[in-house]
Amino acid sequence: MIRPYVLAETNWKHLKDEQFDLAILPWGATEAHNYHLPYGTDTIEGTAIAEESARIAWEQGAKVIVLPTVPFGVNTGQSDIYLDMNLNPSTQFAILKDLIQVLNNQGVRKFMLLNSHGGNNWKSIIRELGLLYPKMFLCSTFWPQSLKREDFFEVIGDHADEMETSLILHLTPKFVLPKMDWGAGKERKNKIKAFSEGWAWTERPWSKISDDTGVGNPMKATEEKGEKFFNAVCKKMGQLLVDIAQADIENLYQ
């Protein structure tokens, strides 16, 4: 069945008389996820969350459209991990500028980046694009932070951990290696305390912080946990899509 809120699936017969209020662009990455998860993990997750959230919003009357997912992200700290693909932030800016220009010219004035990769950082890019397209409402979301992961998972990490492994077990279990092949996801912390505390930042050289490219122990992951978390994230994201699509962007503050 064709989903009219997914651009890659819909058609000109439908679109020629349609008008959308909000465009959603999922943005993932192509990178190693421990030994056992696919390189497309972030892209798989972002696409599925965007499309299911859009379904929820569409069924509530929100005029939303999901654009095709961008499968490459910023992976400058993983340049020595085989076939981890990188887009520099300046390249991301150029891509977004071109896409937002299309939307702006065609009257789709609300745009959301549905980010699915921790290495992507959108704030400065959105600030600059906002000056170029002042009539556009631009925003970004990062779905892993939308809920308290402690309510769903026992061991919290940030890459190929219990959460991500559970999600992929739910979404695409055929791409997950047997549990005997899972790495422990142990992270080596920076010896300078400030960087571990989070108020100082330096890029993590991935091959130095993890033996298996994972950060966070995945061993307690289950498909059931993944399904529960996926549904909860999409419910919350779907409501956000409704709120943005139906909002008067000239009257957002009180």
Image (cartoon, helix red, strand yellow):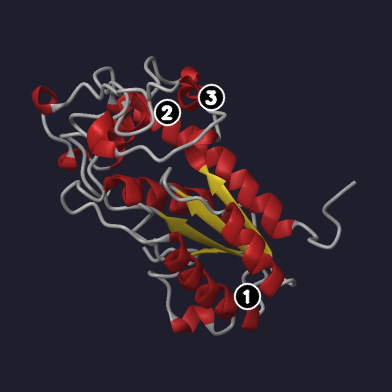
Precedes in sequence: disc 3 or disc 2: 3
Residue at left offset 19%, top offset 46% = 81
* Viewer-side residue, 70 vs 225: 70
Residue at left offset 47%, top offset 52% = 50
Type of the residue with mark 2: Lys
Q: Which quadrant would residue 248 be assigned to in this image?
A: bottom right
Question: Relative to 103, does residue 144 appear above or below in the rendering?
Answer: above
Type of the residue with mark 3: Lys
User: In 3D space, how far apart are the residues under numbered discs 1 and 3 (Cα atoms)?
Assistant: 35 Å
User: In 3D space, how far apart are the residues under numbered discs 3 and 2 (Cα atoms)?
Assistant: 13 Å
Residue at left offset 29%, top offset 28% = 223
The residue mark sitting in front, 3 or 2, is 3
Q: Which quadrant would residue 45 be assigned to in this image?
A: top left
Q: Is mark 2 on a helix, strand or loop?
A: helix
**Residue 123, image x, y percentages:** 60, 53
**Residue 2, image x, y percentages:** 39, 66
Q: Name the residue under label 2.
A: 228
Q: Mark 1 points at which residue?
A: 19
Precedes in sequence: disc 1 or disc 3: 1
Q: Quadrant of the N terminus?
A: bottom left
User: In 3D space, how far apart are the residues under numbered discs 2 and 1 (Cα atoms)?
Assistant: 33 Å
Q: How crowded is mark 1: few (under 14 residues within 10 Å), some or many (20 or more)?
A: few
Is 159 displayed left or right of 26 in the figure?
left
Please tell me the numbered disc located at residue 148.
Answer: 3
